[in-house]
Image (cartoon, helix red, strand yellow):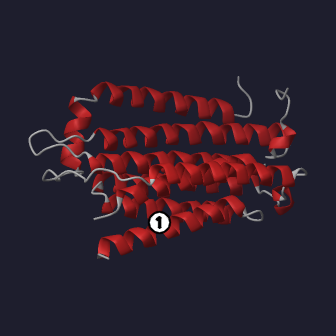
Amino acid sequence: MVPLEHVIGLSALLFVIGVAGVAIRRNLIVVLMSIELMLNAVNLAFVGFNRLWPGTAEAPRLDGQVFVLMVITVAAAEVAVGLGIVISMFRNRDSVNLEDVSLLKW
Amino acid sequence: MTTQEILFYAFAALAVVSALGMVLNLRNTVAAAMSLVVTMVSLAGIYVLLEAHLVAAIQIMVYGGAIVVLFLFVVMLLNLRADEFAPGRQWLTKLAAGLVVFAAGAELIRLLSGELPEPGELPPGFGGYRMVGISLYTDYVLLVEMASLLLLAAIVGALILAKRRID
């Protein structure tokens, strides 16, 4: 049996690595990858808690796994739009450096 | 230590190391994308250990297949040069921010390292395509419709954004 405390701990650790990636990297593509990593960490927590409360044989509960599928859908949509933004930014600024797009920075 | 525990810790170590490799790799974006694949596949292995078989298969297909390939397409399409991946000017402050975030995460892990209740008995067929499908198309059918709408909007949005000129 997999220790579920450690599954949740691994989820938190991966999420923190993703946050650190968003904070310290300037390459927009790597920032998008870090966001993917954070979404994956949340998915791991969903699956772990779903294993903790799987329901009974008459009424199984799969809410966690269904939500993971939804998160994967949202992640796919987000990557498609995000990489579209990356391409149009590269076309306009000739760069994927986040410090070159600071027009909205206060 | 059972085989499942050994596999879990091996997959967990692989996931953390490759995630760190993705974030800290300052030279090569293609290598970062490859590290991301390793993270996704080891997470799929952990999903199998947690009895989420369908989710593990979809994780490999969608993340390891589609999403990372999309990243690689863009990296190679833009033909990025290595000098754009140097750390920022205020890299020390950013490193400090990263350490603070890491400490917050360690605190979170410590908070969550309390005892969880024992996992319940598994229903037969738990996590298989049949059970997930029944749940998806009865209780969550509205969510499926919303997902289709979201994907349509994403397709149109990506096309509009990546188009050179909108006629």
Spot the residue most to the left.
A58
The chain identifier of the residue carrying mark 1 reads: B
Q: Where's residue A102, x and y in %?
A: 85, 33
Q: Quadrant of the C terminus of chain A?
A: top right
Quadrant in the picture for residue A78 = top right
Which element is circle 1 on?
helix
Residue sitting at x 19%, y 38%: B134
Classify 10 Å Cα crowding around label 1: few (below 14), some (14-19), many (20 and above): many
Q: Amino acid at mark 1?
A: Ala
Q: Is residue A82 above or below residue B92?
A: above
Q: Quadrant of the N terminus of chain A?
A: bottom left
Residue sitting at x 52%, y 53%: B109
Q: In the drawing, does residue A36 fall left or right of residue B149?
A: right
Residue A33 seen in the current view: no
User: Residue A49 versus residue A102: which sits nearer the camera?
Assistant: A49
Residue sitting at x 45%, y 63%: B41
